[in-house]
Amino acid sequence: MLEEFEGKLPAKLRRIFRGFRQPIDIQRYLDSIPYVGEERDRCPLDVMKDGQCHCLDGGLLAALALRRLGEPGLLIDLVPGRDARSRKLDDDHVLAVFKRDGRWGAVAKSNFAWLRYREPVHRDLRELAMSYFEAYFNTEKIKALRGYTRPFDIARYDALSYAWDERGAAELYKRFYARKPVQLISKKAESRLEPADQREFDSGFLGVDGDWVFHPEK
């Protein structure tokens, strides 16, 4: 998979991909290209050739790059809740996760500064997911994170050629999103949540491209 993917990259992009030495290098590359939250979900080859991504296709590229570093290539989905009117509170958020010395970290593409990289200091995936909780609020200041999925091993789907075939990537994404989330907080805890205050809100939206921000239905 990796050898064939690298062979399809233009020379300049191949050098970039082969230049990743640590997870933070992958994060810095994702940070260097624009966040574009369009409906199209690219394969990793098109992410690099087009120089843009969102959390899903950026996450897949990150997981593929982590495989080059000797990691398994694992994705998890951070899942928002719904309110009493059954409105989805926010977008899902995808993480490419990795381990160092038995501790979990994450690489992620996001429009929001605080929903990106996590150092590998978390004892388990629940702890890692909860590290995003306070910063995962929507335009109505509601803290929206409610669950996460177990790791999804992209290597199991190499036959789909998802790294360079958008149809294969689409099938992988379909299977990824079919996984049932693990609940992070109880309904009782949810009922007691305080909204983000103005200082949190302002800092969370610093540098955000407003064209690609999720808004709950009115």
Image (spheres, helix red, strand yellow):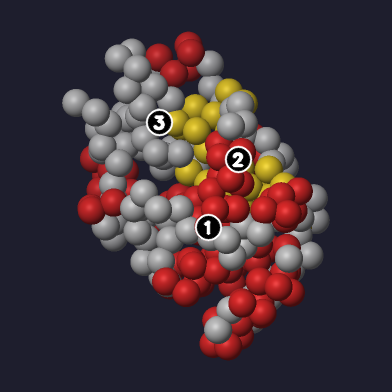
Mark 3 burial class by Cα count in 10 Å: few <14, some 14-19, many 20+: many
Q: Which residue is mark 2?
A: 176
Q: Nearer the viewer, residue 64 or 121?
A: 64
- Residue 150 visible in the picture: yes
Mark 2 burial class by Cα count in 10 Å: few <14, some 14-19, many 20+: some
Q: Horizontal and vertical percent for residue 86?
A: 35, 17
Viewer-side label of 1, 2: 1
Separation of marks 3 and 2 at Cα, in angstroms: 20 Å
Q: Which residue is mark 3?
A: 144
Dot placed on the residue nearer the N-terminal end, 3 or 2: 3
As shown in the figure, which amino acid type bears the numbered disc 3? Ala
Q: Which residue is mark 1?
A: 166
Q: Horizontal and vertical percent for residue 44?
A: 55, 64
As shown in the figure, which amino acid type bears the numbered disc 2? Phe
| Tags 1 and 3 touching, CB below 8 Å | no
Q: Secondary structure at mark 1?
A: helix
The residue positioned 58% from the left and 23% from the top of the image is 183
As shown in the figure, which amino acid type bears the numbered disc 1? Glu
Placement of 129 over or under 98, stated as above or below: above
